[in-house]
Image (cartoon, coloured by chain):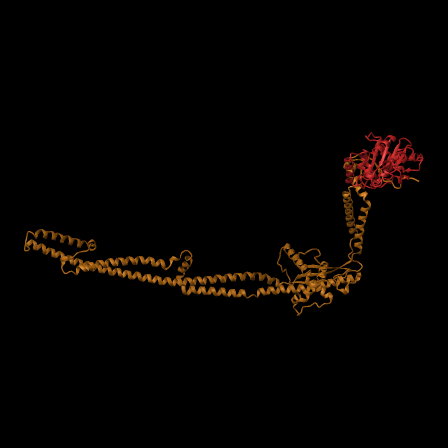
Amino acid sequence: MSDTYTSRTLREITRIVASRFHGVVLIFLAVVIFIAAATIVSPRWYRSHVTLLARPGVAGNPLEASEAGVLRDNVSLFVMTQREIVASDFVLASALMKLDGLPVAPEAPGQAASWYGSPRVGAFIRENAKRLRQLKEQVSVVTPGGPDATFTQNFTIRVDCSTSAKTMPEGRRDSSRQAAAMRAHDLAEAVKEAYLMRFAELESRRSRQALDLLENQALASARLRLEGAATAFRDFIDNELRGDLLQVINMVGGRAVGAETGDASLATRFRGEINKLDEQIAQVGALRAAIDKELAKSDDADLVIPDAVTAGNPSIQTLQAKIIDAKIVLNSLVPRYTDAHQEVSHTRGELALVQADLRGELTKQSDRLAQELAVLQARRAVLAGRVEEDRRRVDELAGKVARYDQLQRSVESAQAIFNEEQRRVVSAVTAEKLAQNPVLVSTLDDATYPDPREPRRPIIWLNLLIAALGGLVLALAYAFLADHFDHSIKSVDEAERYLGVPVLASVPRIRGRIISHT
Amino acid sequence: MTELASAQRPSDVRLNARAQEAYHGLWASLFYSGRPIGRTVMFAAAAEGEGVTTTACGLALAGSLPAGSSRVALVDFNFRHPCLHEVLGLRAGPGVGEILLKGLAPDAAMQPVCQGLDFYPVGQVGSRVADVLRSQAVVELMTTLGGGYDHVLVDVAPVNQYPDAAVLASAIKDVVLVVQADRTPREAVWQARKRLESAGAKVVGLVMNMRTYPIPEFLYHRV
């Protein structure tokens, strides 16, 4: 007996177990016996199989999947869907109602949908929720060998039924093995029929929905609207716009940048010119009026020439200079000589001549101004006419632009509606393909009759093994916990460690009397 | 050899052979190992039923062997639940109670058990246990007995339940605590030790009583 750490630990463990050996053995045996008894007493199960085959309704691969992986995904998705359908409340409730002897049929022939929505099924589901839950645990769908990479797939509905038979109607709870095996078969058959009915109903509903999508009138009306809008637009361009097309497009495009390109700028441009012409006409008119006023005087000597006239006419300037010269000569001669003096009279005559010339010149000038005035007024009339014409044209163009704009918008919105409808139609086409290729599910093997002599027996040695392990763990846990919470003094070491007092001796427990006397 | 020793007894009080072996060991480790220990030793336990009476009695029987090797006095101070006389098959009185209260001579109360072992029974004290234990008479009795014997062994009531042992500690300094293995919690023993020491006594050591060995022998030698 060495005293290493390991052996001391081992001895401690042995002590803990040995000091509560009876309790440990009791717990261990209790667990094992309980599990063994439970295993033996537990109801026996029988399993019935229904094998079904799913394949496309038309020849050829409906899924057009060239890659095996995609196909496999589709198939496993299909099987998963079938699993959901089989485990659905409606299918299981239909099966149970059939077993219970209740009528299981659509209320109107060829209308399976009404059966699934009918309040009778809903009421049955509510009343038998517990049975349905149990049945759901008994039914499973499997694909033997996993999903195939081909487009036919067989799958199996498995129904387990025990001798305790809680899901069955009251009259069929016979606990004999014969009855249990029979029940498994009947249940499997009922589930299969309910499933097939449900599947056919779902399949027809799916194809109907696909056709509904295709027969949708919305696309046609959208197309008509689009065509109408396009025609109206084209007619407008051909018949009404003609040469103005480019300008209208420019205006529609430029309208966004600035609205001043139309009649307004045209008017301001011409308005300046007209104003300038009006000013000139006024000037020329005033000048001519001044000249005409002078000309109206009878005496030539009284003629006063306006500065504006003098500035623009060199011959008048010459004549005026001559008049001034003649007047200066005359002024120098008059004090010295009488009127009869030859030179005086000669100068006077000359002066009168020059003045007469001036009058003539002014008259000519007046005529010239009249001509100029006429020219200016003619130009002004022309300009005003053009402005008027432009305004009219601009008004006309604005109307066309508005119409063009409106037509363009209607075409655009019709196009958008049409595109949306077309997008829906693309999905409808896929639906159509599916509708034309329904999946058919048919029965390969009817529900099997399990052999009453061969139930699915529990693996007793495995259960016992688990029980033994569990019992061991429980018993050891008990021993160690009890030891941990037991503070009594168990050894000399412990006494000295906890109390700090030497142990003088340890007296063993002695059976019988220690001290006896007669 | 032990059978022979028992056979030598004049009286018919007999000690189990295995027990005798164990008590011899205890005697040796108490008195022959050079411990600083007086002639008078008190045997106490933390709680009732630990086997104090049996231990004191067995030790006295084993210590007085071989016959006449030493003179031992066994005194019953357990006024609460006296049973030493029943174990030995002797009278319960007059005894210590009468000596302390009425001044009875110790010799008059003494009952011989065998050669070298005298027994002083508990006697009668009524309800005045604490007063009696506190009196000077106790000290006088102990002195007298200490003068007359080599060893005086005293049985007393449980420490944690009665104050007797703590009161008596003023007269008897050395205490041996008897502990039943696998039963008394260490906290209780600790408590008893603390009480005794605060009363002025000295806990010489422990006796582990009724010790069991849970590991079977064949396993014990393997692990």
Quadrant assignment for the N terminus of chain A: top right
**Residue B22 visible in rendering:** no
**Residue A213 visible in rendering:** yes
**Front residue of B21 and A468:** B21
- B180 vs A434: above or below: above
Location of residue B218 by image quarter: top right
Q: Residue furthest front?
A: B102
Residue A427, image x and y in percent? 57, 61
**Front residue of B40 and A273:** B40
**Front residue of B160 and B24:** B160
Q: Residue furthest bottom?
A: A108
Q: Is residue A209 left or right of residue A237?
A: right
Chain in red colour:
B
Chain in orange colour:
A
- A483 vs A360: above or below: above
Q: Residue visible at 69% across and 68% down?
A: A105
Residue A238, image x and y in percent? 42, 64
**Front residue of A39 and A145:** A39
Residue B145, image x and y in percent? 86, 32
- B191 vs A400: above or below: above
